Image (spheres, rainbow, N blue to C red):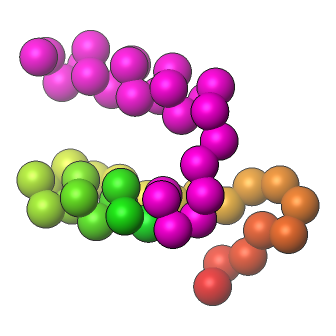
Amino acid sequence: MMPHLWQVQIEKALTTNAIYKHQAQRLVRELTKIEVLANVIFIGQGSSLA
């Protein structure tokens, strides 16, 4: 799959379905393993940087 197409698909999935902090952190770890630059951005009520 082309990287840009994959990026569009994952952005669409993540903007329509919220995920929990631990799920986001695991996703970032897995993406990092395959050398994909990824970060968790906390938004909304009760968000923290911890």
Q: Main secondary structure of the magenta part?
A: helix
List x then y, in percent, for residue 13: 50, 26
Total marks in image: 0
List x then y, in percent, for residue 15: 61, 30
Q: Is residue 50 left or right of residue 38?
A: right
> Which residue is located at x 11 percent, y 17 percent?
1
Q: Is residue 5 left or right of residue 48?
A: left
Residue 12 sits above or below residue 15 on the image: above
Q: Quadrant of residue 26?
A: bottom left
| Quadrant the C terminus occupies | bottom right
Q: Quadrant of residue 17?
A: top right
Q: Is residue 40 left or right of residue 32?
A: right
Residue 27 sits above or below residue 3 on the image: below
Q: Is residue 14 magenta?
A: yes
Residue span colored magenta: 1-24
List x then y, in percent, for residue 28: 35, 59
> Which residue is located at x 13 percent, y 16 percent?
2
Q: Is residue 18 magenta?
A: yes
Residue at the extreme right of the image, as rendered: 45
> Which residue is located at x 44 percent, y 66 percent?
25
